[in-house]
Amino acid sequence: MLELRNITKSYTIEGKTIPVLREVDLELAAGAQMSLIGRSGAGKSTLLSIIATIEQPDGGVLRIDGKDTTAMPDAALSRFRNTMIGTVFQFHHLLPEFTALENVAMPLLIGRRHQEAFGEARALLERVGLKDRAGHKPAEMSGGEQQRVSIARALVGRPRILLLDEPTGNLDEETGLAILDLVFSLAQEHGLTTIFVTHNKQFARRMATGYELKDGRLWPL
């Protein structure tokens, strides 16, 4: 499902080139679950952004479901991303002026799938335990509820890959564990290839496969 070959990425800051990823290789089968840890600044979010096709690598190849995403034109890549990849960030990035239902439906509305948008959104809000909060705006919900809305939004397009970038980072441990249990349950239900970035080694060990990103390379845990 997911294949990275010789992925490299550097940034130039004040005229100095700083390598972040050095020839990263990774293969994950459909339905595989992987955790990724590493110190702050190690490049975890950069790697996840490249896998999400939000950011392009300097070199190497990223294949998703056998397709070379690094060779896709921008418009085709956007459509591919919208159907194949769901992403949950540490900060939920919900649109404050819209209700939970509207936020979850947004990816389908953007993808011009209007007929199914609100039905799918309602079903997912019920699945994440927020059936009665569909009409509430983000400011009217707790942090844990907002993150569950963002999980529902990530899944509404029925992606094949789920990427989680510190989704419990702003939550207390009890709420964080509840969110993780929900995510893992949903990932198994939908057979999603899942990558979970975290600073919490206890959380990381719950995944079947684990890597540490260090010195720009992946090292098995």
Image (cartoon, helix red, strand yellow):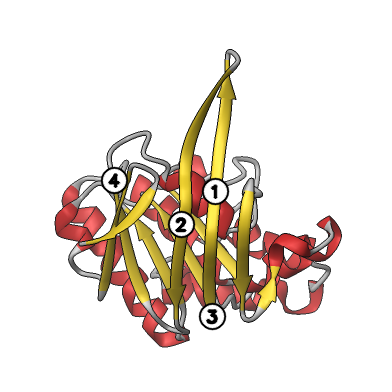
Marks 2/3 in contact by CB < 8 Å: the verdict is no
Q: Residue at x 77, y 63 (%)?
A: 71
Q: Position of residue 150 (x, y in %)?
A: 50, 57
Q: What crowding class fits label 2: few (fewer than 14 Cα within 10 Å), some (14-19), or many (20 or more)?
A: some
Amino acid type, residue under disc 2 in the picture:
Val
Residue that mark 4 sits on: 38
Amino acid type, residue under disc 1 in the picture:
Thr
Marks 4/1 in contact by CB < 8 Å: the verdict is no
Amino acid type, residue under disc 3 in the picture:
Met
Q: Residue at x 64, y 45 (%)?
A: 58
Considering every residue shown, the one lying at the far left of the view is: 202
Which one is in front, 84 or 168?
84
Q: Measure how far apart labels 3 and 4 are at the Cα level.
A: 24 Å
Marks 1/2 in contact by CB < 8 Å: the verdict is yes
Residue that mark 1 sits on: 8
Q: Measure how far apart labels 2 and 3 are at the Cα level.
A: 17 Å
Residue 24: mark: 2
